[in-house]
Image (tube, rainbow, N blue to C red):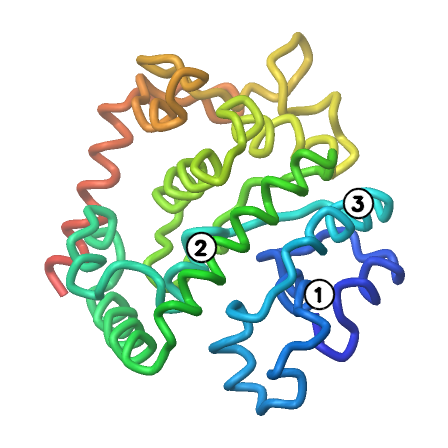
């Protein structure tokens, strides 16, 4: 959202979702912040050092009253803010083999350039604020929706969702809350709770069969036996075969 509108302006106007926790950090700026009249780039790089976290509960309550939903995209913003691992570590992620190598190298160059110019302390503070803000929103009863904004810089479709779920648990949400954010909550948000999002007679047959309990460890969502897509069963072996073909197509570039 435009900074001139701001979080409160968007909520008052009836904004339905706040993606990426946009403008929460601006709304939490200290009243005596020395950056209020600073150039935009300086504000973006250092604002996290001048926040009043006592404003968090009121921001969460304002979101709840407005009935807005929130999509956090935590891991993506670690990369965008320059708070992630170095590019050389990100390049070792197994999922990058499913992305054109030219795009992967562009991502790596972007991360190197960003990390050279950011204030690392401010970047980490920004990410920690986002985690605390998400926990406060969930505690206040705000609807949370699962999303990762993929494809994006080192945010590979499918794989990024697993990183997002782990990050949400690290922020203080329970595995149940995280699973709900990607299933039932989505159906409620779209106004179709009787069509999908829960397992019941008459619902759309989009299911994941797992080898271990995700309520014990949300990482178990990645331990698939297979998936049911609109009633068609895809065993994990077929999924891996398809992934192998994708990886091979990019290796041959």
Q: x, y (%) of residue 78?
A: 40, 59
Q: Considering the numbered disc 3 on the image, is that residue within a helix, a strand or a loop?
A: helix
What is the number of the mark on residue 185?
none
Q: Nearer the viewer, mark 1 or mark 2?
A: 1
Residue on which the image places disc 1: 27
* Residue depicted at 27% across the width and 74% down the height: 106
Q: Secondary structure at mark 2?
A: loop
Task: Kindly identify the residue that appears in the image at 42 percent across and 67 percent down.
Answer: 123
Q: Is residue 5 above or below residue 34?
A: above
Label 3 to label 2: alpha-carbon separation: 29 Å
- Apparent side of residue 190 relative to residue 72 in the rendered image (left or right): right
Of mark 3 and mark 2, the one earlier in the sequence is: 3
Residue placed farthest to the front in the image?
Answer: 32
Q: Would you name the residue on which mark 3 appears?
A: 61
Quadrant assignment, res 61:
top right
Q: Which residue is mark 2?
A: 150
Q: Position of residue 134 (x, y in %)?
A: 59, 45
Label 1 – label 2 distance at C-alpha: 26 Å
């Amino acid at each position: 959202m435009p900074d001139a509108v701001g979080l409160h302006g968007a909520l008052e106007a009836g904004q339905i979702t706040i993606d990426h926790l946009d403008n929460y950090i601006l709304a939490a700026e200290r009243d005596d912040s020395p950056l209020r009249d600073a150039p935009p780039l300086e504000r973006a790089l250092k604002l996290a050092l001048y926040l009043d976290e006592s404003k968090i509960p009121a921001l969460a309550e304002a979101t709840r009253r407005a009935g807005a939903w929130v999509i956090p995209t935590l891991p993506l913003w670690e990369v965008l803010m320059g708070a992630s691992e170095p590019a050389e570590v990100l390049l070792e992620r197994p999922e990058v083999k499913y992305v054109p190598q030219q795009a992967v190298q562009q991502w790596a160059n972007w991360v190197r350039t960003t990390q050279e110019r950011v204030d690392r302390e401010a970047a980490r503070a920004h990410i920690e604020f986002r985690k605390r803000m998400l926990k406060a929103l969930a505690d206040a009863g705000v609807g949370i929706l699962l999303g990762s904004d993929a494809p994006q810089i080192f945010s590979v479709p499918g794989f990024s969702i697993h990183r997002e779920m782990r990050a949400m648990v690290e922020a203080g949400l329970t595995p149940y809350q995280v699973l709900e954010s990607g299933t039932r909550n989505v159906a409620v948000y779209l106004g179709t709770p009787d069509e999908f999002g829960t397992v019941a007679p008459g619902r759309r047959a989009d299911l994941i069969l797992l080898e271990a309990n995700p309520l014990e460890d949300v990482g178990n969502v990645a331990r698939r036996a297979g998936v049911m897509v609109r009633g068609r069963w895809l065993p994990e072996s077929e999924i891996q075969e398809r992934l192998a073909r994708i990886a091979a197509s990019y290796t041959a570039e």
